[in-house]
């Protein structure tokens, strides 16, 4: 295949054995973990957890990614759509409240092929970096119930240095607008589990509260009250964070409270994570 699924528009050749694009993904779907996951937002994971499908590879290159082994080093196993469809049925049978596709951008066509074979009856969540192409997102219309995008940066220079991408803020804004077009209203079921809508995540980085405050203001200005917001304080230095002195530590309580105060000032609806979540024990084991 010739791939232009993400905003990089690599026009890359992806074959069964190799990939020439930024993400280096081949034409085969590669997955690192499929299992119940209990540490997402309460509206998604509830008591029984969400069924998380972690895809290998990523269209970004975040130096601090907590999933560095699979996002940057592409560790995982190749799985066909037919095999994944069977696994989704098994995952659904465990009683999970939702099923979440984590960083699936590179395999959107394979994911759609999978869901044509078997589409679970629980809400389907598309967990994304926010660095998405609008045309690719349009392919997912009718398949995805909940969009769970990151909004990582208001500072594009910071995005370039830490995630190796250009124009992140505009790309994320346009992507989330498309997600909201598809799912314009947050719907909560009788079981207190989200059924439809958009939930925007933002991870606070050490030394960069100005970036976080900028993100919250963009969300307020661009999306009003259409989406929920999840403010995350779970950052721990990982990947190649030790090569960047400004992010080679956890965030401080003072930094987090500064951003939290802005969330409250703007009256954004959603969640704020506790700082005790900043622990490597919450990172899944990649047992493939």
Image (cartoon, rainbow, N blue to C red):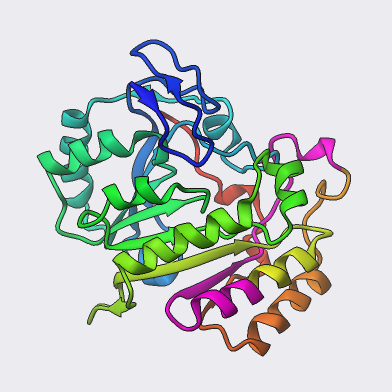
User: What residue is shown at x 41% (from left), y 34% (from top)?
Assistant: 106
Location of residue 18 with respect to 4 vertically, above or below: above
Q: Quadrant of the C terminus?
A: top left
Q: Residue furthest right?
A: 245
Horizontal and vertical percent position of residue 3: 40, 28
Q: Specify the segment rendered in magenta.
A: 217-244
User: In screen coordinates, is 227 left or right of 194?
Assistant: right
Horizontal and vertical percent position of residue 2: 37, 23
- The mark total stands at 0
Q: Quadrant of the N terminus?
A: top left
Location of residue 258 with respect to 103 vertically, above or below: below
User: In screen coordinates, is 25 left or right of 252?
Assistant: left
Q: Residue furthest left?
A: 117
Q: Is residue 46 at least partly visible in the picture?
A: no
User: In screen coordinates, is 159 left or right of 210?
Assistant: left
Horizontal and vertical percent position of residue 86: 15, 36
User: In screen coordinates, is 102 left or right of 99?
Assistant: right
User: What residue is shown at x 67% (from left), y 89% (from top)?
Assistant: 265
Q: Is residue 71 magenta?
A: no
User: What residue is shown at x 63% (from left), y 86% (from top)?
Assistant: 266
The one of 269 and 248 positioned closer to us in this rendering? 269
Location of residue 114 with respect to 261 vertically, above or below: above
User: What residue is shown at x 71% (from left), y 70% (from top)?
Assistant: 214
Horizontal and vertical percent position of residue 237: 74, 45
The one of 196 and 21 positioned closer to us in this rendering? 21
Q: Is residue 241 magenta?
A: yes
């Amino acid at each position: 295949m010739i791939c232009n699924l993400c905003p990089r528009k690599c026009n890359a050749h992806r074959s069964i054995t190799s990939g020439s694009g930024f993400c280096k993904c081949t034409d085969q779907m590669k997955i690192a973990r499929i299992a119940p996951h209990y540490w997402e937002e309460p509206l998604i994971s509830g008591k029984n957890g969400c069924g998380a499908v972690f895809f290998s590879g990523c269209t970004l290159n975040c130096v601090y990614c907590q999933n560095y082994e699979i996002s940057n080093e592409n560790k995982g196993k190749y799985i066909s759509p037919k095999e994944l469809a069977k696994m989704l049925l098994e995952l659904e049978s465990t009683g999970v409240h939702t099923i979440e596709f984590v960083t699936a951008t590179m395999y959107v066509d394979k994911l759609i092929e999978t869901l044509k074979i078997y589409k679970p009856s629980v809400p389907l969540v598309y967990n994304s970096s926010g660095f998405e192409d609008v045309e690719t997102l349009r392919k997912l219309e009718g398949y995805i119930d909940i969009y769970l995008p990151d909004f990582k940066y208001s500072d594009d220079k910071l995005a370039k240095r830490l995630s190796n991408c250009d124009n992140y803020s505009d790309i994320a804004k346009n992507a989330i607008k498309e997600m909201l077009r598809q799912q314009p209203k947050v719907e909560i079921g009788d079981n207190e589990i989200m059924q439809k809508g958009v939930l925007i995540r933002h991870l606070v980085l050490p030394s960069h509260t100005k970036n976080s405050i900028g993100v919250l203001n963009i969300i307020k200005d661009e999306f009003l009250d259409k989406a929920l917001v999840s403010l995350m304080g779970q950052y721990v230095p990982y990947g190649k964070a030790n090569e960047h002195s400004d992010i080679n530590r956890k965030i401080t309580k003072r930094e987090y409270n500064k951003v939290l105060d802005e969330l409250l000032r703007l009256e954004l609806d959603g969640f704020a994570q506790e700082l005790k979540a900043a622990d490597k024990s919450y990172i899944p084991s990649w047992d493939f």
